Image (cartoon, rainbow, N blue to C red):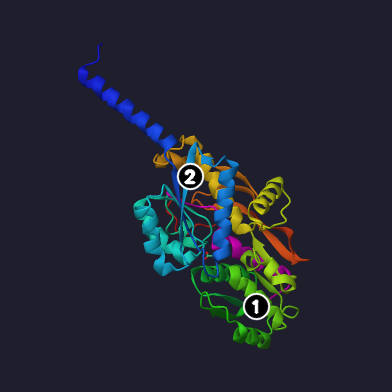
Amino acid sequence: MPFSRRTFLGATAASVAATTRVFGATKAKLRIGLLLPYSGTYAALGNNITDAMKLAAGERGGKLAGREIEWIAVDDESDPAKAPANVNKLIAGEKVDILTGPVHSGVAMAMMQIVRQEKTLTIVTNAGAQAVTGQLCAPNVFRTSFSNWQTSYPCADVMLKDGRKKVVLMFWNYSFGQESMAAFKEGFTKGGGTVIKEIAVPFPQTEFQANLSEIASLKPDAVFVFFAGAGAAKFVRDYADAGLRDKVPLYGSGFLTEGVLGAQGPAAEGIKTTLHYADSLDNAQNRKFRDAFKTATGREADVYAVAGYDTVHALAAALEKVQGDASAQKELIAALEGVRIDSPRGPFRFSKAHNPVQNVYVRQVKGGKEAVLGVALKNAEDPAFGCAMVK
Ligand code: PHB
């Protein structure tokens, strides 16, 4: 049957549109937004995430699925109050194709309100707030780092096995610290332990003296802690200076020593933590990654760099499935859900709630290095409480 003029024109217009889309997709730069701290106590974390993202892109010839990258970074200052404006700057102002970040859970909570509404494809590169892959979970939101629960709950068992029955908790008093303590306490009390005191420190304050005197007088079996970045470096040094290091052992999620072992020096010796990564993990991917990061930046890699690195490799693998067309969001989400990565941390995939399924390791600082004592939880999957995508 001959084409009617109308069908013919329609078909032509459609094929022109398709050509333009593919052409556009291969030509236009992929706009990746980074909402990260480049100042304040978490600045080193933001820098390591950023540099590892760029390292991973460099390993792919500077392109993801054939598209060059435009990086658009905003210093979020780890300030939740400034988060709505910063997120809008990237989404509405800069029209990013993909939003990544943040480090701080409070910033992440503010970001979630906006990206759920705008449907921006978002990959959380650190913040562990439970709601990101729990109550507020969304098809367009993935996380390559961890949930609070994954980093804190397993430490309860480690401490109980070490015979620590009466403990003090000490933490920065915002969502991450609160959730981290709740997850720890759940495991610890279930196993017969008692929390004798909870010391909440306002974020990002680092005046610990009065609290350390109180710990000395309470004489607990151990202290379970959340501080990170520059604050963690200072806390561990102050703890040793107060004469507590050899009397009351320190435990925590691994953020207590990540990226700051050099700054902590001998004060960190003996600290036991749980985390989904350790510098000394003995696998080929980790060795290659650490060498490449050191060569590129002159610094040691850490857990923050791992999340940045995996974010770009996961995104690249998924984008290849849609020929680089980030606007094909449904297909891109399905591709991300299917990604399997041989990460420096070990095997990594996304759960139904889009949180990493990953091993959690027991680590201890020995001779200035993070030694791996064993696996606390193999293929740990966050419970994803309240996530409607998980049935
Ligand atoms: C968080 O706020 O979620 C957070 C910040 C720093 C860390 C870990 C978690 O090292």
> In the image, is 86 to the left or to the right of 284?
left
At 60% from the left edge and 82% from the top edge, which residue is drawn?
208
Question: Which residue has dot 1 on it?
Answer: 167
x and y percentages locating residue 100 in the rendered image: 48, 54
x and y percentages locating residue 3 in the rendered image: 25, 15
Q: Nearer the viewer, residue 96 or 118?
A: 96
At 59% from the left edge and 52% from the top edge, which residue is drawn?
52
Instruction: Using the rendered view, name the quadrant where residue 259 is placed.
Output: bottom right
When the figure is inspected, residue 74 is found, relative to residue 1, above or below; the finding is: below
Question: Label 1 to label 2, Cα distance in Å?
Answer: 48 Å
Q: Which of 65 and 29 is in front in this view?
A: 29
* Total labels drawn: 2
When the figure is inspected, residue 179 is found, relative to residue 201, above or below; the finding is: above
Q: Is residue 311 visible?
A: yes
Q: Which comes before the other along the chain, label 1 or label 2? A: 2
Question: Which residue has dot 2 on it?
Answer: 69
Q: Is residue 228 visible?
A: no
Amino acid type indicated by mark 2: Ile
Q: In which quarter of the image is the N terminus?
A: top left
Q: Nearer the viewer, residue 300 or 322?
A: 300
Local secondary structure at mark 2: strand
At 66% from the left edge and 56% from the top edge, which residue is drawn?
298
